[in-house]
Image (cartoon, rainbow, N blue to C red):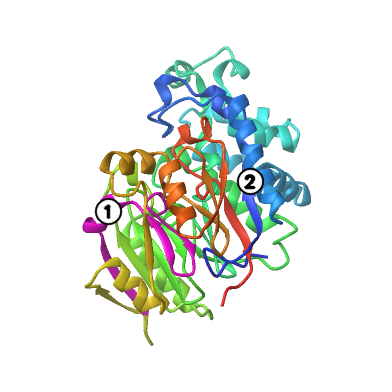
Amino acid sequence: MIKVHSEIGKLKSVLLHRPGKELENLTPDVLEKLLFDDIPYLKVAQEEHDIFANTLRAHGVEVLYLTDMLTEALEAHPEVVSNFINAFIEESKIKSQTIKNALYKYLVNLSITDMIHKMIEGIRTHEITVGKHKSIMDMLEDEYPFFTDPIPNILFQRDPFSSVGHGVAIGKMFTHARQRETIFAEYILTYHPRFHKNPPIKYYHRLNRYPLEGGDILVLNKNIIAIGISNRTDPRAIEFFAEQLFKENTDFETVLAFNIPKSRAFMHLDTVFTQIDYGMFTIHPGIENKLTVFEITKNDTRFDVVKVVGSLEDVLEKHLKRPIKLIRCGGKDVITSVREQWNDGANTLAIAPGKVIVYDRNHVTNQMLVDAGIEVLEIESSELSRGRGGPRCMSMPLEREDIE
């Protein structure tokens, strides 16, 4: 069951991906293509991720892993495995039919668990024998070290889909490097025993035209959703999503579209703005004067859109109907603010109202949270932070308790 009507309700169930060999297939030559800025040390990254998962468990959260759930989904429905493999190969953008055929034969003969891990870590060209008779296209593709690229960004489970009420928005990913991740999400949400008999409503689909990524979606309460117009999410996708959401019999009535600066540092709304308590948010001060908000509201036919006038506090107070406090990442010092935002100081994961998981490295922001009365649970982050995503980025809530 999917049940997420807020950003701060007590977290009951969450989906994670423990980093694996895909990180060891990163090289300097492919970092930009695969959206990483550095190469994490796998052993330490796994240790840090285990601390993250154990922190969640220690506070009563059910921790589920992507690879386990996908394995269970495909084992429960072996009749869809062939379609799953073909979808993965097609999304890998391989031009040679000979190589496509060889990849299918290779993958279908693995156990389901091994197949999933191999898809994520990447398939190197030396792992598969294509045949003696090669076309020019075959030989050109042989020059690249991978038949299918590794998927290191799957660490960030927030982005391929987003839990919204009792439904989901499966992302149309902006970059080719991340498009295969949504296949995994689609098959879990469709075929896993947890969802198969009562599948969640899909408000957005991976094959839709315009990009929409989960890191831009914040469920503020049962009536209001905030979505970033960002590097990765198109305003036309937001309007389509809002229209589908309003068509269903839900309590959601308003979507607030936040137009944030388009830069690598601000790739999603949740890298600069997250909720930590009923009326309290972290924010990167560098976006405040550059932020435009559009209000999309449900009407009898479709929806209305208006540009909102006023400060961010005013906008939030109007819609949440309570006083708002913004905790500015890094405080008043510009250098500290920029540095800690880069290291995901604003990317907090609330596991209950006023209780958050954060990276330990952002000590200035973390102390500000403590001073504001927030319970702060710090996790180690020397390697995880190299991927450019924090605790919220690494987690997809499946169920939260409702809030008042």
The numbered mark at residue 83 is 2
The residue under label 2 is which amino acid type? Asn
Quadrant for the C terminus in the image = bottom right
CB contact under 8 Å: marks 2 and 1: no
Q: Quadrant of residue 288?
A: bottom left
Query: In this view of the protein, which residue sits in the foreground, 44 or 202?
Result: 44
**Residue at the image position 45 percent from the left and 72 percent from the top:** 244
Magenta stretch encompasses residue 287: yes
Q: Which residue is mark 1?
A: 287
Residue projecting furthest to the top: 132
**Residue at the image position 46 percent from the left and 55 percent from the top:** 371
Residue 254, image x, y percentages: 40, 76
Counting residues from the start of the chain, the first of labels 2 and 1 encountered is 2
**Magenta span of residues:** 270-297
Q: From this viewpoint, is residue 281 visible? A: yes
CA distance for labels 2 and 1: 43 Å
The residue under label 1 is which amino acid type? Ile
